Amino acid sequence: MKITNEGEIEMKIELTPIGFVRTEAKNIPRHWSVSDAEGKIVIDEKYKEGLRDIKDGQRIIVLFYFHQSPPFTPGLLVQKPKHSDESKGVFSICSPVRPNPIGMSVVEVTGVDGCTVHIKGLDMLDGTPVIDIKPMVEMKAV
């Protein structure tokens, strides 16, 4: 990390995918909350043991890289989503065109077979690089 004379932080972060999304679905919804699309996440063999406690019916959070998004420019800090009549700041919408093109989806696990996690509710394209998988932890009533 380096801090410039202007007080800006310069840092490079390098991530390596743990796997990739595979799907034959042609019409992928723009958001997981409205998706019934099915597919799978194929994880690199070296991470197989990390899938050990993933179960059918469980919801998981998938962090991924928007690999087909156009490059981000400062003019895209405000965008007009298709579902809205007004423009909004990029950090208040789910646009794939972002300063760091990282996406997040919540999907349902329909099966685990070796290095493959079968899922339902995907909004990722075939070939999407997966950065991480986390359990979906529901908030408990107090």
Image (cartoon, helix red, strand yellow):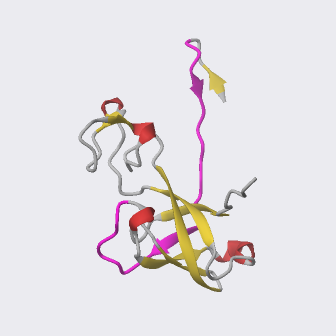
Residue 134 appears in which quarter of the rendering?
bottom right
Give coordinates of residue 137: x percent, y percent.
Answer: 68, 61
As drawn, 92 above or below 27: above
Residue 56 appears in which quarter of the rendering?
bottom right
Give coordinates of residue 28: x percent, y percent.
Answer: 34, 69
The answer, for residue 66, to whether it is visible in the render is yes
* Quadrant showing the N terminus: top right
Task: Report the residue that reaches farthest toward the front.
Answer: 142
Q: Residue 11 lies in magenta, yes or no?
A: yes
Determine the residue positioned at 52% across, 77% down: 119
Question: How many marks are shown on the rendered structure?
Answer: 0
Task: Report the residue that reaches farthest toward the left.
Answer: 85
Residue 17 appears in which quarter of the rendering?
bottom right
Q: Residue 42 lies in magenta, yes or no?
A: no
As drawn, 24 above or below 78: below
Determine the residue positioned at 39% across, 66% down: 34
* Horizontal side, residue 27 vs residue 104: left or right: left
* Horizontal side, residue 97 vs residue 55: left or right: left
Give coordinates of residue 72: x percent, y percent.
Answer: 36, 40
Q: Which of the two residues, 40 or 10, is positioned nearer the viewer here?
A: 40
| Magenta-tinted stretch | 6-30
Q: Main secondary structure of the magenta part?
A: loop
Task: Report the residue that reaches farthest toward the bottom.
Answer: 113
Determine the residue positioned at 59% across, 62% down: 61
The answer, for residue 124, to whether it is visible in the render is no
Determine the residue positioned at 55% across, 74% down: 108
Give coordinates of residue 6: x percent, y percent.
Answer: 55, 12
